[in-house]
Image: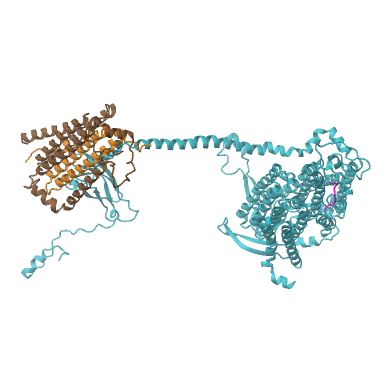
Amino acid sequence: MEALHKQFPNEDFALIAIVLLLPLIGAFVNGVFGKRLGKDAVRLMALSAIGGSFLASALTFVMLATQHGEGKLSWLAWRWMGVTGRMGQTIPVDVKFSVDAMTATMMLVVTGVGFLIHLYSSEYMRKDPGYHRFFSYLNLFCFSMLVLITADNLPVLFVGWEGVGMCSYLLIGFWFTEEKNAKAGKKAFVVNRIGDFGLIVAMCLLFYYVGSVHWDGIEKNANALLTPIKIWPIGNLSKETLPAFLATILIPDKPVQVYGATLVALALFLGCAGKSAQIPLYVWLPDAMAGPTPVSALIHAATMVTAGVYLVARLHFVFILSPAAMAVVAVTGVCTALLAASIGLFQHDLKKVLAYSTVSQLGFMFIGVGVGAFAGGFFHVFTHAFFKACLFLGAGSVIHAMHARIHDTDKSQDMRNMGGLKRFMPLTRYTFLASCFAIAGLPLTAGFWSKDEILWSAFSVKITPPMALGGMTPFEWPSWLGQAIFWAAVLAATMTSFYMFRAYFMTFHGNFRGWKIVKGWKDPHAGHDDHHGHHEETGPLEGPEPRESPAAMTAPLVILAAFALFAGFLYAHPIHVEPLGHLLEGVFDDAKRVVGERPGVEDMMWPMMGAGFAAFLVGTAAAMWVYLNKAGAPERAFAARMPGLYRLIYDKWRIDELYDATVVGMVDALADIFTMADRWLVDGVLARLTAALAALIGTLLRAVQNGRVQVYAASMLLGLAGVGWFLAAPHAEVVVDDTEVRQSGQIKLSAAPGYGYSFHWDGLGQADSKLSERSDVTVRLEPGEKKDVTVKVKNAFGLETSKTVSVSRPALPPGMKPPEQPKVPSMVRPDIPTGEIPGDEIHKLLLPKGAQ
Amino acid sequence: MKPFDLIFFGLCTLLVLLGGVGTVAAKNPIRGAMGLLMSIVGIAGMYLQLSAEFLAAVQIIVYAGAVVVLFLFVIMLLGPQATTAAGTAGTKPSRYFGAGVFLLLTLGAMSLVWRTRSEIAAIPKPPANLGTIEGIGRELFTTHVVPFELSGALLLVAVVGAIAVARGKQADPTRDEPARKPLDKGPELRAAVTGTGDGHSPHVKEAG
Amino acid sequence: MSTVPVEYFLVVAAALFVVGSVGFLLRRNLLVLLMSIELMLNSVNLTLVAYNRLRPINHDGQNLAFFVIAVAAAEAAVGLAIVLAFFRVRKTIHSDEANLLKN
């Protein structure tokens, strides 16, 4: 162990590189060479890549755990870029990965569950021609997910975020030759994109206000987010810029301010809503069931959709600064949980039921992190991965068996064609049952502990708002909010157990309704068949009776079911068996200063757990009664009595249609407008205008180039005439030389000479007419004086022209004297010395002073 | 000014300008050539007035005696086709345009001279040998001997070029193979060659 | 020897030049075109000689006129040869027919 610690020190923990690179290499090899390698080699490559990654993750976890979860293992790959911050500092953005307790746990989940799903799909997709492509994408997904969770800063996380989005698109639309699948992939990607916008906005806000984007930096400087930011009125809007009647409506008396933390948190939550399928961006997840079932298991149950929860938990130090945002998160979570659960009550497609169940459970996770139970919410991520993956894989096993029989994708997933499968697929049945117990919340199962942790936190939470700065009153949680969330979540939990057991009973109990599909097939096991010879479908569909899946598919089911049942004891908070909790303490410690317990709730934990237990009992019993005892008759009666409501819920509350009518319709209309603009303006006007212009110029120019010599001669003559006119006309140009104007005030003006030119200057201020006929004159100016000088030019033909220039001398700055004029030697009488002077020296005496 | 000078000048001007207009306006190219001759003679007269006697002689000998004769040869070679069809002097508006331009520019030139008439200095007395053969010859063979020789080469080249262009393709027994016919210029050309039988065709009757 | 002002000769030369150019531009007969060119060359000669008379330092003007005459003769010869060749091909000496390169 010591050797390992020495080999991989905390600051340069290169094992992370191994964890990341193995799936990447697997993706690359399978993608590029997969076709040539053959199915067995592809399977080996993919499984070994993810398996190796799992081993490295396990080693990382152990190494971290031996430090009692205090340390943080990080590895810097390279410096990506530096962004200039608000105060001119350089904010470094590095490609850096770090592992703390939460990340290590998540890594184990991703690689472990990923490995099991790889194993499962090696059998599930055995007959698919795109085998290598599938594993390439799957490995690429694991790589992206690992990048996301090991990222040390927000940009690298965003890289992983986008990567999983892209892989999700690729995998949902794996069978892209069918339009339905391609559209589902597109929908997932586009809806995710809307969320990504929120993430980018959050990143920019963090760059600006906090000046750091890596977790440690944000945590340290998180208080910088407690600056009030004015969000309304924006920009130039004010009472002065708007007309009076608008101003009274739109401009409030006090500008609306929120803390920066709220803005960042809400922007981040938009991203999470996109990725983790919360209201309003959950619509892609049910459609994503168009992809192969292992994809649904891995991406849309265990890992990708939990990225949003991970992000909130990771940036909890931002969220706790904003109770408003936390309230938004929690309320959105509970609303989503309720909405999705209600839709799941009536779905017929097994995978759709599980999809809505996922959305609902994600809502639970967001309730957890929304009320400040970050560890609890994260733990639900952890357990949900196991039981949801097990459920999906079990469903896949069922569908695999049904598909072998029915060969129609939609019909093989329809629960109305299933029933009584417990006879044929016992292992699948028991693992499915175990996971159903877990998700419904049978006491002592994993789901029970994690869900209960969330429920209790919602009930008992009290959020301390941050201090009021800058004249702001931060949002405070109403005292009833936590309890309201609790009871709504209990309702959702009831619905959860109801629809999960509905699915279980419809699939595994009763009589197998799949015989009806096949013409004339006799059920060798049943005593009597109810619809013998009744053909519901057109066309015979041959197929064997459903059989248990091979070991490669059932082994992961067993492992996952075991975890689903027993993993709860890793963080069973009420009974204080919480090894994982101890590990995660170090990560979420600082949340304790904000998230606390309401006074007077300490003794209510066990009674409140009873509410959860009651939810489980009620839901399960109701499902058993409706679907096991009465074989679904009450549901049909309900459908008959209230067909409108039934259809509404069955149609997912028509939210998709609402989006189509509003948002998508808006975008379509905009696109139509632009198409029209493109067709009319660009193609019609601009293109034709340009073409017409070019044609016009061409026509004009072509007239000169018609090959007739006389036309050319005419052009020559025109040119000649122009030159002649230029030469015959006089031209007056004046060159002003003012290099000495500052010292002596002299400006030299010279007129351009020409053949036979004669000049005449005006405005010189001198009466000397002789000087004014020269071509060069000098003008003297006083400081600050301006003169207009005109020169008249006459050429040999007697044609005249003139030009005026104005010359000026800059005024002196105050206090300066004009430079001294050079003294003109004055004529003074020379000193004539008296006395005897030799004759030849007399002439010298008459010279002026200074010239002797 | 001596009146005789002015009258002589006027006469020459008439010759020049009328000849020029006649050249340009005549339909019959023979008339045009005659106009050109008139103009050249007028110019020669003006040279005399300008103390360029040698040049006047050269003008008559070369221009009037060679160039105009060359023109006449070609006109007669072309025969009746030398006269282009009616309405060839441009369209009516362009004719008036041309006349207008001529008028305008002439008036412009005259006005330029008129404006500066007060400054027309007396013509300086020329040196004795201005325009004499001796004077020109001295300069031609000393200062301008290079252009002189080059113009000789130019004339040679012009002669060769004229012959080459005007000759056309002839049947050359040494060039083409005996069995091959010379390049066919088309039946119309053949008709023209054999058709305009005024005997002045420079072509040898083509074999075959 | 002559007392006519030199400027008069310049005007005549200018007028002759204009006549020549107008004729060149407007007539379609190739022969007339060539003759118009001769007129223009003559006008230039006249100008040169007139200026030489004005400043008789040397005989430059007259020498240049001499060369102009020589070149004009050569050019007339070649031009007439081209007219003949053209006539052989197109059967006319209408300058508008010289349009094989057009369009």
Residue at x 67%, y 63% (from the top left corner): A17
Most prominent secondary structure in the magenta stretch? loop
The residue closer to the viewer here, A120 or C11, is A120
Q: Position of residue A497 (x, y in %)?
A: 85, 47
Q: Position of residue A618 (x, y in %)?
A: 88, 45
Q: Colour of chain A?
A: cyan
Tell me, yes or no, if residue A783 can be seen here: yes
Q: Position of residue A466 (x, y in %)?
A: 70, 53
**Residue reaching furthest front?**
B179
Q: Give the magenta-colored segment's residue range.
A: A544-549
Residue under the point 65% across and 37% down: A665
Rendered shade, chain C: orange
* Residue drawn 68% across the image and 36% down it: A661
Q: Is residue A441 visible?
A: no
Q: Quadrant of residue B122?
A: top left
Chain given the colour brown: B
